[in-house]
């Protein structure tokens, strides 16, 4: 006989059009944290995103999803290329900075990548991409990138995680 769930273990239903409840439920899915960069006619631009995923190894594709209401959305949706940076658990300040300040690269070491997008120093990995496709998806766009160049930090390093509105790090269980 299967064990019964206690009342505290049962799921509480909500309407899928309840934005606050949906956002809360989505927040239960812990994710890694990235900063996406591109070069614009006005200079370098960055944006923090946790909506990143690998898509395919052949061809090498990744995706991320910026909100349409973001002031930086159009620049990224129209960019020919961009760079996705996987942040380490020591880069919370970088994530917070690019969550609010897209054009200010002051104090952040970077170099121009192969297609011109800024590559931030010290990240766990960086994927330089050509824009492969942009798909409308409700209040976001899905931007698919084809990886043209990739780099990974040598040595060890844990990723910066985002869960229920908080930054953290992975703690292995024994």
Image (spheres, rainbow, N blue to C red):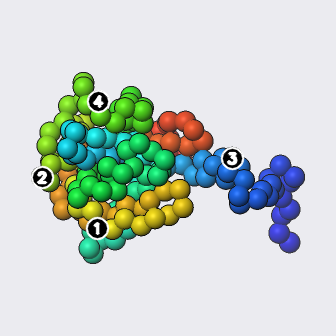
Find residue 38 and report its horizontal and vertical position in percent. 25, 47
Distance of label 4 from label 1 (alpha carbons)? 27 Å
Q: Residue at x 46, y 65 (%)?
A: 136
Asked which secondary structure carries label 2, the reply is loop
Cα gap from disc 2 to disc 3, whole angstroms? 41 Å
Up/down of 38 relative to 109, above or below: below
Q: Which residue appears farthest toward the bottom when viewing the image?
A: 58
The residue under label 4 is 104
Dot label at residue 20: 3
Using the image as rendered, state which of residue 1 and residue 104 is in the foreground.
Answer: 104
The numbered mark at residue 114 is: 2
Name which of mark 2 and mark 1 comes first in the sequence: 2
Residue 171, numbered circle: none
| Whether residue 91 can be seen here | no
Name the N-terminal-most of marks 4 and 1. Answer: 4
Q: Earlier in the sequence, mark 4 or mark 3?
A: 3
Q: Tell me the CA gap for discs 4 and 3.
A: 31 Å
- Give the labeled residue for mark 1: 132
Query: Could you tell me which secondary element the residue under label 1 belongs to?
Result: strand
């Amino acid at each position: 006989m299967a064990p019964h769930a206690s009342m505290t273990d049962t799921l509480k239903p909500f309407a899928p059009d309840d934005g606050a409840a949906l956002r809360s439920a989505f927040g239960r899915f812990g994710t890694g944290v990235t900063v996406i960069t591109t070069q614009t006619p006005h200079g370098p631009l960055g944006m923090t995103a946790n909506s990143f995923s690998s898509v395919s190894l052949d061809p090498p594709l990744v995706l991320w999803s910026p909100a349409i209401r973001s002031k930086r959305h159009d620049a990224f949706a129209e960019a020919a290329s961009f760079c996705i940076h996987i942040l380490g658990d020591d880069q919370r300040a970088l994530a917070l900075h690019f969550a609010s300040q897209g054009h200010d690269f002051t104090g952040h070491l970077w170099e121009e990548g192969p297609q011109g997008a800024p590559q931030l120093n010290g990240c766990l990995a960086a994927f330089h991409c050509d824009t492969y496709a942009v798909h409308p998806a409700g209040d976001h766009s899905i931007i698919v990138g084809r990886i043209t160049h990739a780099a990974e930090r040598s040595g060890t390093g844990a990723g910066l995680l985002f869960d229920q509105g908080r930054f953290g790090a992975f703690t292995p269980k024994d």
